[in-house]
Image: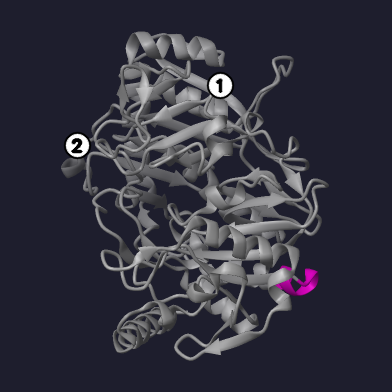
Amino acid sequence: MKENINLSFEQLEKIALQTENVKKTNLDILTAYTGNRTSRSPNDRYIVQNILNKKSINWGEYNQPISKDKAQEVKGIIVKYLMGVEHYIFEGFIGAEKVTKSVRVCTDKATQAMFCDIMLEKKNKNLQKFTPYINVVCASTLKLNYKALDINSEAIILIDLKARSVYIAGTGYTCEIKKSIFAILNYYLPKNEILTMHCSANCDNNGKNTALFFGLSGTGKTTLSTSDSRRLVGDDEHIMTDKNVINIENGCYAKCIGLKPEKEPQIYNAIKKGAMLENVPIVDGVPKFLSAEITENTRAIYPLKNVQRSMPNKTSGLPTDIFFLSADAEGVFPPISKLDKEQIEFYFLSGYTSKLAGTENNIVTPQAVFSACFGEPFMPLKPKIYVKILLQKIKKHNINVYLVNTGWYGGPFGIGQRIPLACTRSLVDGAINGDIDKVEYIKEPYFNLSIPKSYKEWTSLLNPIDTWKNRQEYIKSAQRIMQSIKDNYKKY
């Protein structure tokens, strides 16, 4: 069957229109549809177990072991399938400066090759020899005989860390490609004291005063990192060396449910030529960003160059401020609090948030979740390895760390209200420019967090107990959540 190697974005777009379930929009870009899987499938993710990684991997829910023999069988099925269908090869790079790795992706979907064209840096046409550091093989339309293979479903995300390869089948959700590449880097780079981070980042106009935003999907990483007064470094995957912060991707993968130009103008304006949409309903050519009829997890995929205020070299100075984002659906966390050293380790290892609808299969209402390093599904090593490097860098470079609740106040989901984005932006900006450190801080008694006593027009929201009509109900909920966090922390 025909093999298409390093086609241009425009060529892939033309093929997709002829052969795949896509729609052209009035923005002169395509919307792709990923089938029945419109989010990640963590229960179908496996890592090949061997003697070298048996003790170092954080085996469990997100890192399920699979034997070398079983992995070889699955790989053979996927490769055989791809050889029998038209497929597309993308060759490019991830990272920047001296931390750059080559990546080859082979997929049966032109739209997935388009995704790679946006998210990864293209290979220079004049580069004669290309040796991939990471190989990704993706057969999205192949449904595996999971009973015969003794795996969880007809889909699989198979990561072979030793071979630095990924084999995907049974899911067309493009995020599986980028998160699997990220997982391989999360295994290798920390061995060189390079911290890999599931976070977004922005900086001042001079590439300094960097802020990092750690959080799971739906907590506000992309939204908060886009700012009219600061420059975007990246929205999801970064590394920190002893000299700088580097965005390892070439584009953004932004959740766009409810997207409005007046609310998030930088994201809205980046959705133009060179971008694409994923699982967004289209009516008469018009994207319906407010509609969740396909999924809550609608996405806009666009190159960094489409963002007016982005760092062209994907690099900025070391961070001065770090924000841990928690979309707390219980409504008990304060909108912002400053963490001490012990609390940094506690909350980074806990990674408490509420998993929001649509980001994973079968999640339809918010659920409390603990995700170590605010990205446990993508971190193959034991969490304390990442925590150790983070704490070393925070101490060495005197970085301020804050816990930010982008979730609810005045009660839990369904009763309380979502903290206004304007409030969160104001508090974050105040932390970055130092204004919020000029006000008096108080200790709230239920999480022992230091919170500002007052700040601009947001004073009434700063202490969460004051936003609840029934203070006793707040106390019960806060104590219950704190106990659940402590219970989860015991495993560390």
- The label number, if any, that marks residue 274 in the structure image: 1
Residue 120 percent across, percent down from the top left: 59, 32
* The quadrant where residue 265 appears: top right
Magenta-tinted stretch: 392-398
- The amino acid type of the residue labelled 2 equals Asn
Q: Can residue 199 be spotted in the picture?
A: yes
Dot 2 or dot 1: first in sequence order is 2
Q: Please tell me which residue is depicted at 36% across the width and 49% down the height of the picture.
A: 359
Residue 28 percent across, percent down from the top left: 48, 15
- The label number, if any, that marks residue 489 in the structure image: none
Rendered position, 257 above or below 81: below
Marks 2 and 1, Cα distance to the nearest angstrom?
Answer: 37 Å
Toward the left, the furthest residue is: 147
The N terminus lies in which quarter of the figure?
A: top left
Q: Nearer the viewer, residue 152 or 291?
A: 291
**Callout 2: 10 Å neighbours few (<14), some, many (20+)?**
few
* The quadrant where residue 464 appears: bottom left
